[in-house]
Image (tube, rainbow, N blue to C red):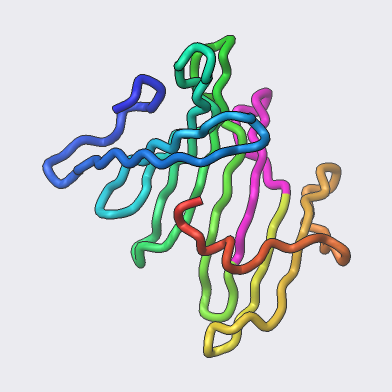
């Protein structure tokens, strides 16, 4: 495992395969390296590094940890960012997905270090028919003063395909 990754669960049935893929990212203006850890064919940890071309070193950028439900569908994604001052990964955000007969609910939370936890920030509800076709969608934002979800009428809503993309 990478020195930047928390120790992963061990066991006879636990096999890690390291996959490295490359992509050009204009935000970092560098080559990004994706280091995936797989368990039972699913990505459980994805570390993202930026290649420093001048020093030929890899700098940690982000890390995502994924959990799946009993059906093998993405249920949780926790994102970490690299803190160079602390020389460790620190929590950034969390996404939870719950699936029901006629709707999928996606909730986002932001890490609040003073509270040492994730606080809800946004919620998307995707309503489907019996054929799992999208019927309607709702976007809510958490009101920090009342701790109640408020419907956002003009909010930009993520595409349903993005919700089910398990490799992002």
Q: Residue furthest left?
A: 12
Q: Residue at x 16, y 39 (%)?
A: 11
Residue 166 colored in magenta in the image: no
Q: In the depicted view, which residue is nearer to us: 52 or 2?
A: 52
- Relative image position of residue 41 (x, y in whole percent): 28, 54
- Relative image position of residue 107 (x, y in whole percent): 63, 55
Residues rendered magenta in the picture: 105-121
- Relative image position of residue 38 (x, y in whole percent): 30, 46
Which secondary structure type mostly characterizes the magenta part of the structure? Answer: strand
- Counting every numbered tag in the picture gives 0
Side (left or right) of 89 relative to 17: right
User: With respect to residue 68, does 160 lie above or below?
Assistant: below
Q: Residue at x 52, y 19 (%)?
A: 53
Residue 119 colored in magenta in the image: yes
Q: Residue at x 81, y 43 (%)?
A: 144
Q: Residue at x 37, y 45 (%)?
A: 44
Side (left or right) of 40 relative to 167: left
User: With respect to residue 109, does 130 lie above or below?
Assistant: below
Q: Residue furthest front?
A: 54
Side (left or right) of 74 relative to 109: left
User: With respect to residue 42, does 73 lie above or below?
Assistant: below
Side (left or right) of 36 relative to 168: left
- Relative image position of residue 142 (x, y in whole percent): 77, 50
Q: In the depicted view, which residue is nearer to us: 121 or 88?
A: 88
Image quadrant where residue 97 sits:
bottom right
Q: On the rendered image, what quadrant is the N terminus found in?
A: top left
Q: In the depicted view, which residue is nearer to us: 145 or 77?
A: 77
Q: In the depicted view, which residue is nearer to us: 71 or 166?
A: 166
Image quadrant where residue 162 sits:
bottom right
Q: Residue furthest bottom?
A: 130
């Amino acid at each position: 495992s990478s020195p930047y990754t928390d120790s992963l669960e061990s066991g006879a049935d636990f096999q890690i395969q390291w996959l490295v893929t490359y992509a050009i990212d204009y935000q970092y203006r560098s080559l990004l390296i994706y280091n995936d850890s797989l368990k039972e064919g699913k990505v459980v940890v994805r570390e993202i590094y930026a290649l420093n071309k001048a020093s030929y070193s890899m700098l940690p950028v982000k890390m995502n940890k994924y959990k799946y439900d009993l059906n093998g569908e993405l249920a949780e994604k926790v994102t970490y960012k690299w803190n160079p001052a602390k020389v460790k990964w620190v929590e950034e955000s969390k996404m939870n997905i719950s699936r029901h007969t006629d709707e999928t609910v996606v909730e986002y939370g932001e890490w609040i270090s003073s509270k040492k936890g994730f606080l809800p920030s946004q919620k998307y509800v995707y309503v489907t028919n019996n054929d799992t076709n999208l019927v309607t969608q709702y976007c809510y934002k958490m009101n920090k003063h009342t701790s109640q979800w408020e419907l956002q009428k003009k909010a930009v809503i993520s595409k349903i395909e993005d919700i089910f993309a398990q490799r992002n």
